[in-house]
């Protein structure tokens, strides 16, 4: 398995609080991605990064921001969590934009 | 935006039955195609991929998929399923104009009865 860790693995938070999820990789891959997985929707891209400090929006970026200050870390922040952001969040990496992506173990986030 | 359709939401089979899961996409240009599997409680794992060349690709665990460009399809097949194949299967597409972005289908839950 690719060296990808996500933290925390589980989190319960209240509506309106900020939340930051972390993705850490040991593969030195250039590209990193954040997806959310919801029943009946498959995986949807939130944001992705194609290098340090280089990020772009995905399909469902509203309410989320990201930062990448180091190659190995990609942070996803929910500025003010809402119940609609209850989901499982997966980080993925790839060495090139056209390569296959490898996924982390996921973070289950519940917003009450 | 591109769309990826997986026609079967839930497939139930007995062990040793043959499997075919459908995947269609809506993009007329160059595509890269993927099938991922997610076992219960686990992360997504790559089953197989198509970039170019032979349209019949073989993946891990006896799975294969056929790219039919004229039908915009990339169906997953396995001649004889096992109980351990119980999982959710996702088709994903990347187009030439969306470097790095994968578009996923909604997934097909496969249940295999022993």
Image (tube, coloured by chain):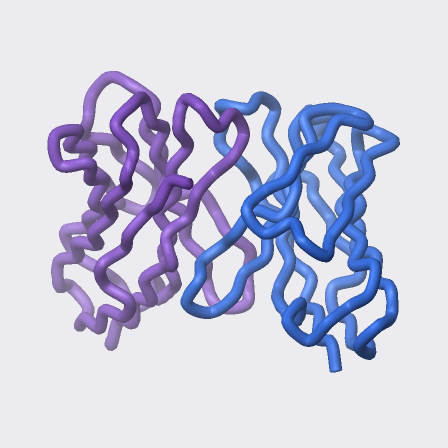
Chain colours: A blue, B purple
Q: Residue at x 20, y 36 (%)?
A: B72
- Rendered-image quadrant of the N terminus of chain B: top left
In this image, A62 relative to A40: left or right?
Answer: right
**What residue lies at 62% left-to-right and 64% top-to-bottom?**
A88
User: Which residue occupies 67% across, 53% down?
Assistant: A62
Would residue B55 appear left or right of A12 to someone viewing this image? left
For residue A32, what is the image quadrant? top right
- Residue found farthest to the bottom: A112
User: In the visual, does B3 lie left or right of A100?
Assistant: left
Quadrant position of the C terminus of chain B in the picture: bottom left
Foreground: A25 or B62? A25
Tell me where residue B16 appears, x and y as whole percent. 15, 63
B50 shown above or below B102: above
**Residue A34 position within the rendered picture, expressed as x and y whole percent measured from the top left:** 65, 46
Residue most toward the top? Answer: B53
Residue shown at 73% from the left, 53% from the top: A64
Can you give x and y, in whole percent of width and height, for residue A20 in the image?
83, 56
């Amino acid at each position: 398995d690719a060296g990808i860790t996500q933290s925390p693995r589980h989190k319960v938070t209240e509506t309106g609080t900020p939340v930051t999820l972390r993705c850490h990789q040991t593969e030195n891959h250039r590209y990193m991605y954040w997806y959310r997985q919801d029943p009946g929707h498959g995986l949807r891209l939130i944001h992705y990064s194609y290098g340090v400090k280089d990020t772009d929006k995905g399909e469902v970026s509203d309410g989320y921001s990201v930062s990448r200050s180091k190659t190995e870390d990609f942070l996803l922040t929910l500025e003010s969590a809402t119940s609609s952001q209850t989901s499982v969040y997966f980080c993925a990496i790839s060495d090139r934009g056209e390569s296959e992506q490898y996924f982390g173990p996921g973070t289950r986030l519940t917003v009450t | 935006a591109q769309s990826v359709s997986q026609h079967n939401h839930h497939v139930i089979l007995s062990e040793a039955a043959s499997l075919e899961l459908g995947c269609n996409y809506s993009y007329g240009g160059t595509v890269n195609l993927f099938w991922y599997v997610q076992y219960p409680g686990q992360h997504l794992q790559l089953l197989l991929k198509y970039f170019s060349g032979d349209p019949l690709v073989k993946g891990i665990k006896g799975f294969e998929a056929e790219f039919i460009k004229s039908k915009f399809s990339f169906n997953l097949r396995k001649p004889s399923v096992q109980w351990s194949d119980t999982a959710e299967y996702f088709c994903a597409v990347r187009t030439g104009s969306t470097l790095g972005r994968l578009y996923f289908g909604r997934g097909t839950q496969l249940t295999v009865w022993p």
